Image: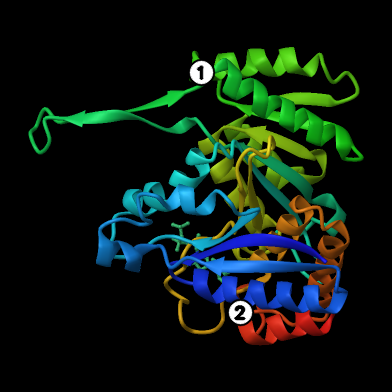
């Protein structure tokens, strides 16, 4: 029996609801298949932990996580703790501490779901968006001076390094090469941002030469939003900076039906550290505790985690079960249905 050690960090808001649903689905799948077992340890980190201890995770948090094969993460955020503390104290501390430099966000319209785009058929929207996850606008470089005075100043410097841009471009071209259409769009803003984004474009052109079989084009981020809405079928694989892709992937999730279904993998492709898997949505306080959070994003996330662990059959079976349930019309309210988290979870477990 293959065993995988998983660290679960449900954290805040609907995070605990969707992660416990995801673990139930994973355990049911592993029992039914009998081929692998997940040894899950849950860490109680997040905003409540911060209110008690003064930090989102203990100072040796990364050391505690390092031995695990993967991290299954919920969501962070609390109405009474500033967002930059919750984000930098846990999620970004793990992503950056473990150099998870790829944030991969697949998006497609699952069976039985509809896009808000009237003319969009399911096959028209099947994208893999690669987000640079280690530098760029989220490099954390900057500062504030003269706090509270009229002269107050704050800087937020984006950082683009040759090594950082090269490795994300290479990952994106490799991914595009593996997908049937072999088509990559490099998102940029080099008309207005004439240093970092120009380096980004130059390196894209250099790396492209290593992949002569991949067709690629370049798109300004603003134009990309209109292309996603107007011509979704013209897009396949996309690579964008940390901030640009953050925004584009929320749009992508909404175009595929709901923020509640979309998954994310924060990958260290070199496998020096554990990679981290999380639904794309946040803490969603408006629905926390109501039992109606859509767990599909956490399930699809679990499928990405299984694939990363080498459990490809299990990953495919999980996606099939998810789509059997979405196709059967068992939908939570965000998808226009009346099902609860519990009902969707049980239906997926029954579909294995
Ligand atoms: P963040 O600021 O961290 O992105 P948030 O709580 O402001 O998080 P999101 O979680 O990103 O917002 O989601 C915005 C809204 O989408 C939520 O308030 C909720 O109504 C809806 N939503 C998000 N995820 C889900 C889900 N899994 N199930 C149902 N509705 C969801």
Quarter occupied by residue 185: top right
Q: Is mark 1 within 8 Å of ligand 1?
A: no
| Residue at the image point whose x is 86% and y is 32% from the top | 177
| Residue at the image point whose x is 11% and y is 27% from the top | 151
| Residue at the image point whose x is 81% and y is 61% from the top | 315
Residue 235 rendering spot, x and y as whole percentages: 78, 39
Residue 150 rendering spot, x and y as whole percentages: 9, 32
Q: Is mark 2 within 8 Å of ligand 1?
A: yes
Secondary structure found at label 2: helix
Give the labeled residue for mark 2: 333
Quadrant placement of the C terminus: bottom right
Q: Residues within 10 Å of mark 1 (few under 14, many from 20)?
A: some
- Does 30 sit above or below residue 297? below
For this rendering, which residue is in front, 25 or 58?
58
- Does 262 sit above or below residue 352? above
Q: Can residue 227 be seen here?
A: yes
Q: Can residue 116 be seen here?
A: no
Describe residue 302's horizontal placement relative to residue 328 as left or right: left
Quarter occupied by residue 103: top right
Describe residue 180's horizontal placement relative to residue 259 as left or right: right
**What scheme was used to colour the molecule?**
rainbow
Earlier residue among tags 1 and 2:
1
Secondary structure found at label 1: helix
Residue 65 rendering spot, x and y as whole percentages: 52, 53
Describe residue 262's horizontal placement relative to residue 222 as left or right: right
Quarter occupied by residue 130: top right
Give the labeled residue for mark 1: 196
Which of label 1 and label 2 is nearer to you? 1
| Residue at the image point whose x is 66% and y is 25% from the top | 167
Which circle marks residue 113 in the picture? none
For this rendering, which residue is in front, 285 or 66?
66
Residue 174 rendering spot, x and y as whole percentages: 80, 31
């Amino acid at each position: 029996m293959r065993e995988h050690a998983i660290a679960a960090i449900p954290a805040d808001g609907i995070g605990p609801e969707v992660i416990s649903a995801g673990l139930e689905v994973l355990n049911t799948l592993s029992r039914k298949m009998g081929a692998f077992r997940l040894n899950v340890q849950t860490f109680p980190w997040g905003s409540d932990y911060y209110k008690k201890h003064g930090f989102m995770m203990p100072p040796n948090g990364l050391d505690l996580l390092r031995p695990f094969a993967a991290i299954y993460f919920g969501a962070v955020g609390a109405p009474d703790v500033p967002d930059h503390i919750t984000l930098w104290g846990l999620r970004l501390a793990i992503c950056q501490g473990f150099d998870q430099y790829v944030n991969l966000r697949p998006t497609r319209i699952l069976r039985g779901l509809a896009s808000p785009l009237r003319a969009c058929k399911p096959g028209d929207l099947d994208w893999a968006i690669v987000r640079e996850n280690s530098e760029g606008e989220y490099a954390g470089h900057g500062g504030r001076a003269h706090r509270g005075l009229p002269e107050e100043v704050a800087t937020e410097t984006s950082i683009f390094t040759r090594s950082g841009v090269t490795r994300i471009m290479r990952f994106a071209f490799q991914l595009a090469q593996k997908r049937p259409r072999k088509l990559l769009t490099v998102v940029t803003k080099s008309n207005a941002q004439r240093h970092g984004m120009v380096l980004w474009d130059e390196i894209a052109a250099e790396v492209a030469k290593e992949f002569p079989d991949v067709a690629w084009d370049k798109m300004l981020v603003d134009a990309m939003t209109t292309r996603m809405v107007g011509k979704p079928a013209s897009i396949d694989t996309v690579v964008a900076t940390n901030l640009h892709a953050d925004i584009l992937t929320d749009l992508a999730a909404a175009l595929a039906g709901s923020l509640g279904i979309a998954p994310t993998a924060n990958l260290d492709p070199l496998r020096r550290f554990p990679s981290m898997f999380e639904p794309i949505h946040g803490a969603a306080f408006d629905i926390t505790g109501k039992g109606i959070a859509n767990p599909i994003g956490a399930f699809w996330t679990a499928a990405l985690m299984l694939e990363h662990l080498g459990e490809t059959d299990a990953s495919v079976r999980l996606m099939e079960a998810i789509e059997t349930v979405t196709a059967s019309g068992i939908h939570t309210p965000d998808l226009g249905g009346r099902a609860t988290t519990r009902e969707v979870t049980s239906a997926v477990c029954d579909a294995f």
